[in-house]
Amino acid sequence: MTEVLKYVCPTCGREARVGRPCPGCVRKSGKPKKRSWKQDPAAEGLDLPDDDFNYQDFVAREFGKAPHRALGISWYWWALAVALLVGMISGLLAL
């Protein structure tokens, strides 16, 4: 004798058998509700980029060919960091 496993449907609150759609949800819509992880059949033939995708060419086309300035920290932030570090070390030595 096999035990029938049941669960409470999180959508409608009715009891349903494991492995089968909830009878309350099926009755409302006439078919089981599509879950978010199920893929839409229309997405099967998408034209996704192949292995010959050139990232450098894509960046040049999207953002232009003008060189961008390098991102960095200005000299006064470095000076502030060094001054704070010296202050903390001198504070520890004064104790």
Image (cartoon, grey):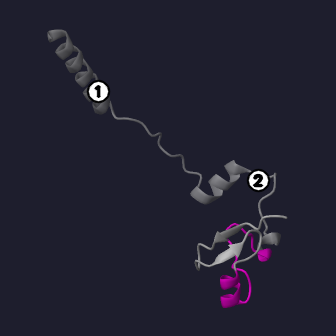
Q: Amino acid at mark 1?
A: Ala
- Up-down: is 46 above or below 22? above
Q: Is residue 64 magenta?
A: no
Which label was assigned to residue 81? 1
Q: Quadrant of residue 78?
A: top left
Specify whether 8 is left or right of 1.
Answer: left
Q: Quadrant of residue 72?
A: top left
Image quadrant occupied by the C terminus = top left
- Real-space Cα separation, disc 1 to disc 2, in angstroms: 43 Å
For numbered disc 2, what is the local secondary structure? loop
Rendered location of residue 61, percent (x, y): 64, 58
Rendered location of residue 56, percent (x, y): 68, 48
Specify whether 79 is left or right of 32.
Answer: left
Of 91 and 25, which appears nearest the observer? 25
Whether residues under marks 1 and 2 lie with C-beta atoms below 8 angstroms apart, the answer is: no
Image quadrant occupied by the N terminus = bottom right
In this picture, which residue range is highlighted in magenta?
A: 23-42
Q: Amino acid at mark 2?
A: Phe
- Up-down: is 41 above or below 26? above
Q: Quadrant of residue 45?
A: bottom right
- Up-down: is 18 above or below 90? below
Which label was assigned to residue 4? none
Rendered location of residue 4, percent (x, y): 76, 68
Q: Which residue is mark 2?
A: 53
Rendered location of residue 71, percent (x, y): 45, 40
